[in-house]
Amino acid sequence: LNELVKFCLCFPIVASARNRDTLGLRPRDLIHKTLRFETPRAPHEKLVLEQLVKIYKRDIKPMEDAYNYNYLPIRTDVTVGQIQSKPIILFLGPWSTGKTSMINYFLDTDILRVGAEPTTSEFTVVGYETSIKNTEGAVLVSDKMKEFSPLEKYGQGFIEKFGGIGLPHPLLKKVTFVDTPGIIENRKQQERGYPFNKVMQWFIDHAALIFVVFDPTKLDVGSELETLFQQLKGKESQIRIILNKADSIASQELMRVYGALFWSLAPLINVTEPPRVYTGSYWPYEYKLNTNSDLFKQEEVSVLQDLNDIIENRLENKIALIRQHAVRVRIHALLVDEYLAKFKTERSFLSNQEQVKYEILNNPKRFDIYKAVTSKHNISPFDLPDPEIYKDFFTHNPLTEFMSLEQHCGYFSGCPMDDLETAITTSLPGLLPSVNQLSKTEL
Ligand SMILES: Nc1nc2c(ncn2[C@@H]2O[C@H](COP(=O)(O)OP(=O)(O)OP(=O)(O)O)[C@@H](O)[C@H]2O)c(=O)[nH]1
Ligand SMILES: [Mg+2]
């Protein structure tokens, strides 16, 4: 990679408007007009993020810790690093479909290596730096306060295939791009030397926008791609399918391929909320003659607008994400408290404590635990996790080691559950007006 950077520094490719024509490059005004990335980051943004971190540490984290929330398998882990992070724009799909070229195109660079053969071999974070800089995966995961530290758990094999490139592009002050190795069908997972699917799932779960890039000349859907689409379930609103390189085929052929793509993806896609599909050519070169350049331009504007929505709504989205997390932590604490309360009442009737615990964990319905939580606290039954999850949770986190919600209350400090509820109903929604004011004036 270092060699590559040196090479690129010797041969800067960022073309000036004057030599763009001679190089056969398209004008970039579409990108500039739609993304307006030169507008500086609003000063309020830092303040809102600081407030979010403060609310998280003061009102949410104590309850996470008190009830071992992070041991739940279905949790969404939130860290200070993630609260402060920029939205992740993730690129994935089969090999050689133009994912890396697309990132280079948006950032007006050719620093990321592209090629006709399978090229990208690392998960690559492209973020902001004042000058071009490479960062090893080991460094990216080592800072506990940073957003990528949870990836350390995927092991040394992955860390060697993880890296970062910093660039001084203003767009990267607002979002972070993540490039991924292309999917090659028929390759066994273990050949990669790390849990590829798990790593991919982490990035999918943490991405604000996911571009799934296809090439019209190879649309075969194999088992790796099928697995990928399984992993994308539930993220339909973040997914944009890109039928890239549309400049390489005739218009009529494009229509045919468009249909074929939908046909082969249909079984893998949630039909009630299908993801949006765009076509176009996302590299810097002029469209070829006799291709549908007007369509490509319109499609590109839509893609850029989606990207811009992510940029403009980044603070609202973050507040909503933290609030949703707080709601989940609250439900978890209420459930543990209810299990504990039931255990205490039943214990007085039956003398064998282990038997009581066994009965409650295996038949929570018989003891009305879930019903009690929904009716007492006005929670939808659909928001409650599966009781099986709690059976497993309590085998690693013994029920009797938890304190009840009430026991956590102090005479002066009050109850942490009240703080959590205030965060959900008041403090977090209260941050929105400052965000809205901000977007009117400065974004
Ligand atoms: N005709 C045409 N070719 C393109 C376009 N975008 C990329 N290419 C070419 O497609 C090839 C693959 O591009 P990459 O950007 O390396 O593709 P990738 O998806 O990152 O590939 P992997 O890293 O191997 O997964 C290169 O030769 C590019 O020059 C496009 O819009 N039109
Ligand atoms: Mg690539």
Image (cartoon, helix red, strand yellow):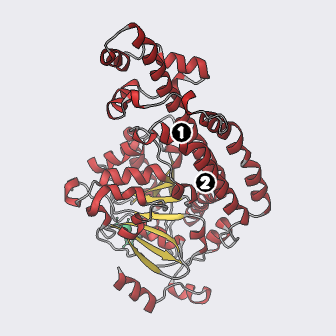
Residue at the spot of label 1: 63
Q: Residue drawn at (54%, 29%), measured in percent from left and top?
A: 407
Q: Rounded to the nearest whole Å, what is the CA distance between mark 2 and mark 1?
A: 15 Å
Q: Is residue 140 above or below residue 315?
A: below
Q: For the residue carrying disc 1, how many other residues have a C-alpha within 10 Å: few (<14), some (14-19), or many (20+)?
A: many
In the rendered image, residue 43, in percent from the top left (x then y), is placed at 72, 66
Front in this rendered view, residue 289 or 421? 421
Q: Residue drawn at (58%, 49%), measured in percent from left and top?
A: 57
Front in this rendered view, residue 71 or 192? 71
Are the residues at dot 2 and dot 1 in contact (C-beta closer than 8 Å)? no
Kind of residue indicated by mark 2: Val
Q: Earlier in the sequence, mark 2 or mark 1?
A: 2
Q: Is residue 312 above or below residue 41?
A: above
Tell me, yes or no, if residue 243 can be seen here.
yes
Q: Is 442 positioned to the left or the right of 174 in the image?
A: right
The label on residue 144 is none
Q: Quadrant of residue 46?
A: bottom right
Quadrant containing the C terminus in the rendered view: bottom right
Tell me, yes or no, if residue 186 can be seen here.
no
For the residue labelled by badge 2, is the local secondary structure a helix, a strand or a loop? helix
Q: Quadrant of residue 169?
A: bottom right
Q: Residue drawn at (61%, 61%), measured in percent from left and top?
A: 301
Q: For the residue carrying disc 2, how many other residues have a C-alpha within 10 Å: few (<14), some (14-19), or many (20+)?
A: many
Number of numbered labels in the structure image? 2
Outermost residue toward the front in this view: 411
The label on residue 53 is 2
